[in-house]
Image (cartoon, rainbow, N blue to C red):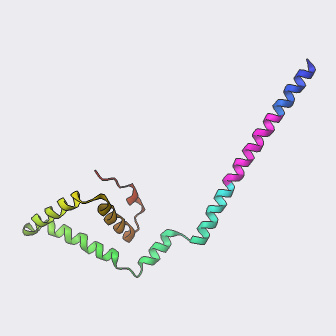
Amino acid sequence: MLPILSIVGSLAGTWLEGRQEKSKAKQKLAITKIEAQAKRFEQDGNWDEKAVDGMANSFKDELYTILFVGIILASFIEPLQPAMKNGFVFLDEAPDFLKYGILGSIAASFGLKSIANFKGK
């Protein structure tokens, strides 16, 4: 009976060693991934900061703001309302690539990451 217990104990010990090695390998892989991300971040810098720096000399966000204020104001001017309605009907029927292109352009101008979560109808 004693030799059987010795064999079982040896097998259990080998199995536990294998599990520990596997756990160590997973941990090492996770650390390597984190280090690679940190290195990439150091090389590329913070994207948000770069986007803000790029907007410093850009007038796109001001242009879009003026455009949206104009759309809102035109919605309250009765003679312009039919043209506004026709424009929105056109945009509603426009191909998706045009709609998403417009959204992407606006998102890039204002630096909105969450626009990717926007879902149409």
Residue 105: say if magenta.
Answer: no
Residue 117 drawn at (x, y percent): 39, 55
Q: Closest to the observer: 46 or 15?
A: 15
Question: Which residue occupies 72% across, 52% down?
Answer: 28
Q: Is residue 75 left or right of residue 33?
A: left
- The magenta-colored residue range is 14-30
Question: Which residue occupies 10% across, 64% down?
Answer: 82
Question: Which residue occupies 79% across, 34% down?
Answer: 15
Quadrant hosting residue 54: bottom left
Residue 69 drawn at (x, y percent): 23, 71
Residue 91 drawn at (x, y percent): 22, 61
Residue 79 drawn at (x, y percent): 7, 69
The residue sitting at the right extreme is 2
The residue sitting at the left extreme is 79
Quadrant hosting residue 59: bottom left
Q: Is residue 47 left or right of residue 75?
A: right
Instruction: Pick the quarter of the image with the N terminus.
Output: top right
Query: Up-down: is 96 above or below 47?
Result: above
Total labels: the figure holds: 0
The residue sitting at the top extreme is 1
Query: Up-down: is 36 above or below 62?
Result: above
Residue 27: say if magenta.
Answer: yes
State whether the magenta stretch is mostly helix, strand or loop.
Answer: helix
